[in-house]
Image (cartoon, rainbow, N blue to C red):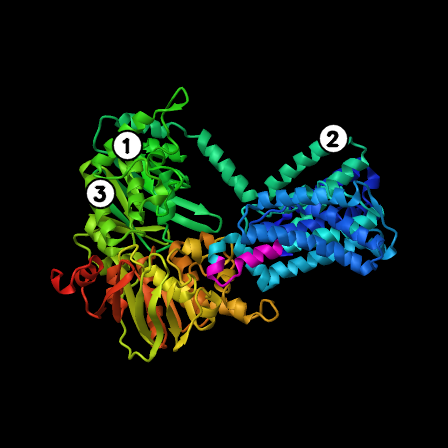
Amino acid sequence: MSAILRRSPLLVFIVVTVAVFGALRPGFISVNGFLDIGQQIAVTAILAFALTAVIIARGIDISVGSTLSVSGVAGAQLLTSGLPAPLAIAACVLTGAAIGALNGVLIGVLRVSPLIATLGTMAFGSGAALALSGASSIPVEDTAVLMAGGGYVGPVPASVVIAVVLMIGWMLVLGHTLYGRWIYAVGGNADAARASLVPARTVQLSTFVLAGASAGLGAVIMIGRVGSAQPLAGQGLEFAAITAAVVGGAKLSGGSGSVGGTMLGAVFIGVVNSGLSFMAVPQQTIYVVTGALVIVAVLATQRQELKELLDGARRAFSGRGTATRVQEAAEGTRERRMELAGIGKSFPGVRALHDVSFTLGSGEVVALVGENGAGKSTLVKVLAGAHEPDTGRLLIDGEPVRLASAEDSRTAGVSVIHQHFSLLPDLTVLENLFLGREPTRFGVLRRRWMRTRARRVLEELELDVDLDAGLAGLPVGERQMVEVAKAMLDDAWLVIMDEPTSALSNRERERLYELVGRLLERDVAVLYISHRMEEIYRLAGRAVVLRDGEFVGEADLSEVDESALISMMVGRRIGTVFAHRETEPGEPLLRIEGVSDGGRLAEASLTVRAGEIVGLAGLLGSGRSEVLRCAAGLSRRAAGRVLVDGRELPSGDLPAASGRGVVYVPEDRLREGVVPSMSVRDNIVLAWLRRNSRFGVVPRGVGRLVEESIERLGIRPPHPDRATGVLSGGNQQKVVLARWLATEPRVLLLDEPTNGVDVGSKAEIHALIADLKERGLAVLMVSSELPELLGVADRIHVMRGGTVAGELPRGATEEEVMALAFGHSPAAAPG
């Protein structure tokens, strides 16, 4: 019922529509009239329920109409040839399921586009129905077959009863079973679903099989309604069913939708069509009016998207020009200054910023620090023009300015380098640099001018990048440099860097630090956001501290030490962030012997004992992550063995590895970690349910497990029903950790476990890892942050060129690690 209540605008539309038709034609509102509407929409609803699952799993099926036609024709022919009625009905359903399976194989296994695959099977089904029937109807007189579409259960049409039963069944499946969770997970993030033991391809294939089977059942009902199998019986039904699902709230982008909403969508379409027909409106007018009302209903049910669209339009047409005037007034000047005065921003149920005030000036680096969820990202969006503040003012060079859009922000000289790249991998470096602001003359790109301007900026920043190179082929570090160059092409005087080194190696970080220095030489101001204390103290002169959306204060970094700054950020004293706990290691638990993946990983051998943390260091591309992925079963091994407790794990078998207690926390939480559209609760139990659901039903103990996990890891806010995608990066990382810790692992493989996580959360995560170590877990951890590895690891293996270059004991120095990473003897390392 909660799904129906969330679709209350559509329910209101239905009530209003019924009332209007009832007022215009009093005979419209009657029990028999409503039963007739139910009978008319029954087949559409049955198809729409299955298509809702297909759409949630990020698919689309436009072949269900033709599948219905060919299934009905095939069943009718078998019936007339002497097959018993029950078997003929089964033949209809199985024919539909077979076509659905073909769709599933094309899409789920062969990776064909759902639109193209189902377009092909739609043509195949239509042609097969016409060929098998000789382009004519096939009469059916068997009462058992006719019962589904023409019979009654008391006063209620049998087709309506079937539709209601299927609706209840689908609601139970999607809301209360493991399979339902899998469908939402695959649609929300297929990579994360696979990494969480979900058989993603099988799940997607099965949704198409169920859609085909539903079309076969719909064929039986259609035969009962008209007394014959029609070769064009399903024509247009696919669009009616998809419309019902979308009107009911299912998003074609996947991961969202409900059967209750789909039912309301089908009822709404049925009421409109029946009402207009009851009023003897011409068919062409019915099409126009129905289409218009469907659009209005979709807008009403997609309230958040509509609100964002209207807000964007309002920002675009109001307050325009203030940034331009400020920029024009500043032309010819070098000294620039931005002042934030009492900035506040709230969202429904959340106060993201409150009374934030500080200043930025040309030629300085100011660090913006705080825990995840402190309001840093919201403040960046305010400065980028994505959000307008509810309270307070922005001033540039003493003049009030309204940054109502990204264009306003760019015009004011503000450029943002986001943590997650805003570049397009399929374009060249040159095309990315001018993306969205391409210079033209009479509609033709001024490529020569673009090259000249781009070369000038790259030379000024001392970047050696091929302008014609495809971005996808560049290393991560060079892509980050292209982001910086793109910002400088805007003639920005203020550059905001949001976690710019989160994906960079140590060498690439050094290049970025040099780049920041060159920006300062150009009198550019830099607002630098990072959770790495060492780079904050290296680059910035002062830090602005936010906590819980409020401005805590500023810190002169030449006078405030790291411990005091962390206390300002978290509101409490924190000891050593990367604290080490002494334990007595047990027997070897994980053994990796001569493992290769046939690619970047050439050969790696190492051992991790129970109650031990082993670090894996090395440059980006050295094969560190590949070792973890082979051990976890995410990648197939070309050679070598992985043993747990002396028993070999099968190659490339993630469920088998998980079953032996080996779990993997991925480096990229957005790609392989969280499913953003799913709740915190569903994300945490996604892997746990595979072993703990009885007969595929979600057990009752889930709520207690989730509450304990949220409390144990300090996930904030502690709301299990909140969508994971709205959480801060650090809290999303905690959700991923909670998911795997819920499975009670024995071997924990951590790939950059605190990347993008604030200092307070880092301390909490490492305290938790230390607890697990004391309980006897074997931990193998990859980190690009050397102080982290040196702080918590008992031993460190250093990777170079896909092999283990050497092993260092606890107490090793950064110089010794880097010497091995670059191929030098540790003894030769300086210091």
Q: Is 209 on the left-hand or right-hand side of 222?
A: left
| Helix, strand or loop at mark 1 | helix
Q: Earlier in the sequence, mark 1 or mark 3?
A: 1
The answer to the question of whether label 2 and label 1 lie on touching residues, with beta carbons closer than 8 A, is no
The amino acid pointed to by label 3 is: Leu
Q: Which residue carries the number 2 mark?
A: 284
The image shows residue 55, relative to residue 812, as above or below, that is: above
Of the two numbered discs 3 and 2 on the same chain, state the one appearing first in sequence: 2
Q: Locate residue 592: give its quadrant.
A: bottom left
Question: Which residue is most to the top?
Answer: 442
Q: Earlier in the sequence, mark 2 or mark 1?
A: 2
The quadrant in which residue 280 appears is top right
Instruction: Indicate whether residue 197 is drawn in magenta.
Output: yes
Q: Residue at x 76, y 51 (%)?
A: 74
Residue 199's x, y, as percent?
53, 61
Could you say whether the residue bearing mark 3 is in a helix, strand or loop? helix
| Mark pair 2, 1: CA separation | 56 Å
Percent position of residue 530, x then y: 29, 51
* Residue 506 coordinates in the image, percent (x, y): 24, 54
Tell me the magenta residue range.
193-208
Amino acid type at mark 2: Gln
Q: Which residue is mark 1?
A: 454
From the image, tell me which residue sits under label 3: 515
Q: Is residue 343 visible?
A: no
| Disc 3 + disc 2, Cβ < 8 Å | no
